[in-house]
Amino acid sequence: MMADTTQADVESVQEPEKLLTPSEVAAIFRVDPKTVTRWAKVGKLSSIRTLGGHRRFREAEVRALLAEAQEQRHSA
């Protein structure tokens, strides 16, 4: 017999985090995709490697970096 699914059970299931390609990140920051790859190499932005060796970036981290960059630009 299967257990009843409650609303709390449904809410506790997390959606997978959205991952962005270097091109998508580059479009957000208006830079070249190679710049995004350089940022990953120097640790400015962390990346995940796919099985094929391609980089993917967490959307939440990208948005946080964008907000930080915009804050610095407005305070300068």
Image (cartoon, rainbow, N blue to C red):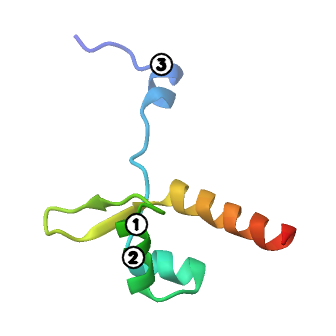
Hey, which quadrant is residue 28 in on the image?
A: bottom right
- 31 up-or-down from 46: above or below: below
Residue lying at 52% horizontally and 56% vertically, measured from the top left: 61
Q: Of helix, strand and loop, which one carries label 1?
A: helix
Q: Nearer the viewer, mark 3 or mark 1?
A: 1
Q: Which mark is residue 23?
A: none
Query: Is 22 positioned to the left or the right of 62 in the image?
Result: left
Residue lying at 53% horizontally and 83% vertically, measured from the top left: 27
Amino acid type, callout 1? Val
Q: Of helix, strand and loop, which one carries label 2?
A: helix
Can you give x and y, in whole percent of width and height, for residue 10 in the image? 46, 29
Amino acid type, callout 2? Arg
Q: CA distance from mark 3 to mark 1?
A: 45 Å
Quadrant of the frame with the N terminus = top left
Contact, mark 3 vs mark 1 (Cβ under 8 Å): no
Read off the residue under disc 3: 6
Q: How many marks?
A: 3
Quadrant of the frame with the C terminus = bottom right
Query: Is 7 positioned to the left or the right of 36 in the image?
Result: right
Read off the residue under disc 1: 42
Read off the residue under disc 2: 38
Residue most extreme to the left:
52
Assess disc 3: are there few (<14), some (14-19) or many (≥20) residues with their C-alpha within 10 Å of its C-alpha: few
Amino acid type, callout 3? Thr
Contact, mark 1 vs mark 2 (Cβ under 8 Å): yes
- 38 up-or-down from 19: above or below: below
Assess disc 2: are there few (<14), some (14-19) or many (≥20) residues with their C-alpha within 10 Å of its C-alpha: few
N-terminal of the two: label 3 or label 1?
Answer: 3
Can you give x and y, in whole percent of width and height, for residue 51 in the image? 14, 62
